[in-house]
Amino acid sequence: MKIERKAFYTKKITVQIEPHEVDIKFGFLTEMKVEHLKMPCTFLAGKEFNIYYSCLSCDGEIVLTSAIITSQIGKLNLSYLMTGKLRKPSFLESICDIFPNIKKRYSNSNCYLESDNIHGTFRLFQVKCPLCKAKYLGIYIYRAAEIPDRPGPKLAPAQVYLDNIAWVEFDEDEFFKEAGIR
């Protein structure tokens, strides 16, 4: 499958985070927070978050909500990029071509995508500009909060590692078929 990468998003993004009750309880985040970040970046997931960035084609505002990248409601979330989840494993090659800093790794009979920079299996999201319909693919890792039932060394908030967002062009029907969505 051919996916053409037109450009990486290199401008700063704005992230607005609403604290979760766990964040408040453990002091990770006590009030709404707005950050201006360059990718790759890590930020608290909170109860909800919104990522704002400008379309590289028309300069319109694109809003990427936590609901978009953590669920499949109304948008595509391919979730873990593993061959066991895909109809065509060659789809992973197309994603590696778009994001050259990720590599294929093998575990048992599955192939998945991972980075040397951060441990975890990448997830993929796809969004369109609401004005000009330019397509974007992004890769990220979501880490759930680590809250022990009893005191211990591990205590960490839920975080999102946003590796990259790319402006791309591809045939949607072919993309969704290879991804196993249609």
Image: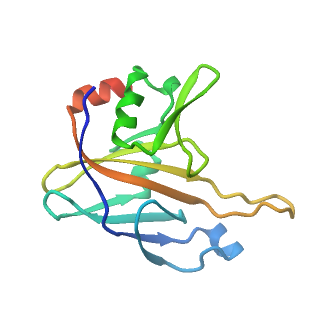
* Residue at x 44% of width, y 45% of height: 101
Percent across and percent down for residue 30 are 60, 79
Residue found at the far right of this picture: 151
Near-viewer residue (95 or 116): 116
85 in relation to 158, above or below: above
Quadrant housing the N terminus: top left
Say if 5 sits above or below 81 in the image.
Answer: below
Report whether 146 appears left or right of 107.
right
- Where is residue 117 drawn, in percent x and y? 56, 51
x, y (%) of residue 37? 42, 70
Q: Residue at x 38, y 27 (%)?
A: 91
Q: Nearer the viewer, residue 14 or 11?
A: 11
Q: Quadrant of the C terminus?
A: top left
- Left of 85 or right of it: where is 174? left
Colouring: rainbow
Residues 106 and 152: in front is: 106
Task: Give the camera-side residue of 36 and 114.
Answer: 114
| Picture quadrant where residue 148 is located | bottom right
Residue 178 % position (x, y): 34, 24
> Residue at 30% of width from left, 58% of height from top?
9
Q: How many marks?
A: 0
Picture quadrant where residue 53 is located: bottom left
Q: Relative to 99, is 63 above or below?
A: below
